[in-house]
Structure formats: structure tokens, C-alpha cells
Image: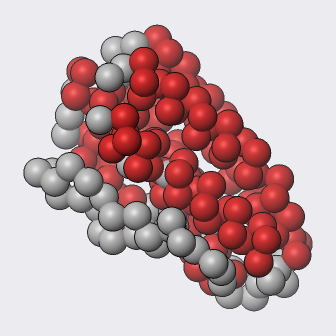
Amino acid sequence: MKAFLSITAAAIMAGAPLALAQSANTSTMPLATDSLSKVDTATFVKSVPSANTFEIESSKLAQKQATADDVKAFAAQMIKDHTKAGEDFKAAISQGQTTSATGAAGTTLDSKHQALLDQLKEVSGDGFQSKYIEMQTQAHKEAVALFSTYASSGDDPALKEFAKKTLPVLKMHERHVKDLAAAHQ
């Protein structure tokens, strides 16, 4: 269970490319970021806003539906940190060299993140909490992979700097959610 949980929540902040969201009856989501060697700017710019919005929206649900105070506190931290990340991303886009970023700093969920949010809305109580922790674990694992890769190989200096500055926060989130997963097995 612990290994499964640590594979399940990081694309959500980073929105790294991964196969479509799991179906309600499937217990794993494929992870496409384990072996990233390079992320192009277009992929990074397209991925971040949807993933960030998912983090905020799923965490708003967790504040209302989670049963444990530590999970609610984590959700509050996600809302705060990902709201700031969204603002920082918009600033990086406006300073960057990327001309294809029109609308990229929006708050619309892509189909993958909408499907994940819909799955989360379908569960309640301990089932909700478990699913939220699972999704956050995956999201942050993938976010760390995406941001690490872009920070080292990205070609837009402003976005590369954004990735570098955001990465320590994502790593902190990843550690925190792993602790939550262990505490709520």
C-alpha cells in the first residue's frame, strides 16, 4: 500500500504527461515521468496550469471532506502553496521567451485532471481521504520529476528559474504526503 501510495499523486501539481486517469475500478495510474530526460517548454507550459488548478480544487474538497485534521492541514497548505505557484507561473510566463503561452496561465482543468477531480468527488469519508492522499502522492512524485527535468534542461530562462524556485516546495510536499500516507495506512 505504501509503495502504491507513493506512486499515485504528483502529476497533479505538475501535470506531467501520463496516461489517462485511472478508471474508478483500477487501482494504479501509469507514471510517464520516471525516466524524463528532457521536457520541452510547450509541454511544461501546457501541463503546469491544469495540474496546479487540480491541486487547489482537490485540496478545497479535502478541507471539507477529509476526516483527519492532519490531512485537512495538508490540504490548506496545498491551497496556499499552489496559489502562490500559480501566481509565480503567470509572472514567469510574462517574463519568459515563450510566445505560445497565450492562455497557459489560466485555471482550466484538462480532461485528465477533470477526470481525477470527478473521481475524488465520488468518494467520501475515509475513502475520500485515502484517494486524496493517493492522488497527492502521485502528483508530487511526478511534479518533482517534471520540475527537476525542466529546471536542468528547460530552454526558457524565466520558466527554468520558476521551476528551480518551485522545486524545493514540491519536494517538501512530496515528503509531507508520504508521511501522511504512512500515518493513514
Instruction: Point out the image quarter for the C terminus.
Output: top left
58 relative to 49 in the view: left or right = left
Instruction: Point out the image quarter for the N terminus.
Output: top left
Answer above or below: position of 139 versus 20: above
State whether residue 65 appears in this view.
Answer: no
Point out residue 123 in the picture as x, y percentages from the top left corner: 20, 34
Residue positioned 39% across, 59% down in the render = 113
State whether residue 142 appears in this view.
Answer: yes
Please identify the quarter of the rendering in which residue 73 is found: top right
From the viewer's side, name the closer residue of 139 and 63: 139
Q: Residue furthest bottom?
A: 99
Answer above or below: position of 67 versus 35: above
Answer above or below: position of 172 versus 143: above
From the viewer's side, name the closer residue of 140 and 37: 37
Residue positioned 46% across, 11% down in the render = 69
Point out residue 103 in the picture as x, y percentages from the top left corner: 62, 74
140 relative to 9 in the view: left or right = right
Residue positioned 30% across, 69% down in the render = 20
Answer above or below: position of 40 versus 30: below
Please identify the quarter of the rendering in which residue 46 is found: bottom right
Please identify the quarter of the rendering in which residue 159 is found: bottom right
Point out residue 67 in the picture as x, y percentages from the top left corner: 34, 15
26 relative to 89 in the view: left or right = left
